[in-house]
Amino acid sequence: MAGFVYKKKVGEKMTSQKLSRMFASKMQKWPLAQQKILVAVSTGVDSMVLLHLLQNLPEEQRPLINVAYVNHELRAASQQETQYLQAYCQMYQIPLFIKNWPRHTHPITGIEAAARTFRYTFFAEIMQQEKINYLMTAHHGNDQVENFLMKLIRGGAIQQLCGIELERDFQEQGCLIRPLLDFQKETLRQYAQQHHIRYFDDETNFTDDYFRNRIRNQLIPQMTKENDQVVEHILNYQNQLNDLLLIAQESGEQLVQNLKQNDDSYQLREFQNLSSAQQKLVLRIIFERADLYLKTTQMKQCLQLLNNLQKPQGSIDLTQNIQLQKTYTKFKIMKKQTQSRLKMSQSLILGEWQTLDEQNQVGLFETDKITLLENDDVYYLEKSPVDWQIRHRQAGDRLMMKSGSQKIKKILIDQKIPQMERENIWLLTNQQQQVYWVLGIKKSDLSQPLVNAKMHYIIIYRKIG
């Protein structure tokens, strides 16, 4: 969270001493004294002020500063800016890392996003190379407001309105810190003027070619005419929103924990008993844990399926490879199963195993030449072991019983076997395609235990995963 936002009175000018004290107080949050940090510098007023503030921290707080700079080759002044930063870092004996982004590699569209990716990839490379754990950027309060308005206009999840985080993980072991988020750009400009800090304005910021620039140059000034404290108000609303969403997140995490079962599925009945708002929160958290960010229409479809009491099972594709699956008393996020089937009808060969999938196998053996395991399921034979086959179920299949037969479909329904699993069920049949065993579920009562010497053969269904 951004936390405290400095509110200046109309016409008030913050002194450089006050800004320095507030910055030093903010920096106490991170124990960085004599720790190596990487500061992203563009030579704009924001990053040059950040660099100056860091250099002038009390000695007991001061980190070991390294500077990273990217020449985007977008402006004629880029070379002049590079030379200035080189001279500055040489004067203050600050290690400087520079990388050019060749103009011929720039994309035709999406240049802002591409530039950001290029910069942060470079920062990560330097941090790994120099064993630096902390990255600092000069994002400030006006950046927060611009982000807020851009996302508000574009639409999306309310969490996006929380804006830029003060601190977040970066790469595997690093930390990205934005210590200027509590300060507005005008305050930073005043500080630069008071300390005679040289900086370069990016002239592309003053054009209206980009959405962010139109927010900055047109919308915010117009809003400021209505209320000159609009920036402070938006930042304070963001802080309040952060607090509320943090409370909601903690509550949602507990609800998810209460619903979760050992097989990574979630209890359906308990989910249905939640309020509509709680259900939406729980689903969002579950999806985020799976790195899924759904559209509003997808979320509605998931809620409709899970709350449909007339449809005990079903599934919804969330991505090309991931789906939400509802099965009677639970639901789960899972990968779509790719079926790897044997031939439609494949004979069991005496003394050999047939692999059904990664977790199961079946084999036909003489009873005195195989050792059974504790969890083996078996079917005993009293007649010749020829012509026994294994296959998936077909329409109209029935399980042979002493008193007649039972529909395989009804057996699966009665035992609440999920629809997806039904497609992977294996059946043991004779040459006439009569079913004697639904593997792992139910076998014909024509199978008898080993009670006499006539039972020479055995079919074993074994789990291997």
Image: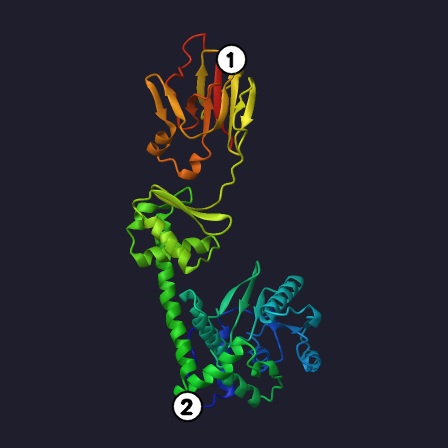
Q: Is residue 39 left or right of residue 319?
A: right
Picture coordinates of residue 215 (x, y %)?
49, 79
Q: Amino acid at mark 2?
A: Val
Residue 67 place in picture, x, y as percent: 64, 73
Q: Is residue 2 in sight in this rendering?
A: no
Residue at label 1? 368
Residue 108 visible in image: yes
Which element carries disc 1, helix, strand or loop?
helix
- In the image shown, does 160 or 85 lie closer to the viewer? 160
What's the residue type where badge 1 is placed?
Asp
Question: How many angstroms separate mark 2 from mark 1 (CA)?
Answer: 96 Å
Mark 2, secondary structure of its residue: loop
290 sits left or right of 85 in the view = left
Looking at the rendered image, the quarter that the N terminus falls into is bottom left
On the image, the x and y values in percent for residue 249 come to: 38, 60
Give x and y (percent) for residue 247.
35, 63
Q: Residue at x 40, y 42 (%)?
A: 262
Q: Measured along the vertical axis of the image, is residue 94 above or below residue 255?
A: below
Q: 298 and 433: which one is in front?
A: 433
Task: Name the image quarter holding residue 263.
Answer: top left
**Residue in view at x 51 percent, y 50 percent:** 320
Q: Residue at x 33, y 32 (%)?
A: 414
Q: Establish if 359 lies above or below 351.
A: below
Q: Which residue is mark 2?
A: 10
The first of marks 2 and 1 along the sequence is 2
Say which residue appears at 52% left-offset and 40% top-offset.
338
Query: Who is closer to the viewer here, 38 or 328?
Result: 328
Displayed quadrant of residue 153 = bottom left
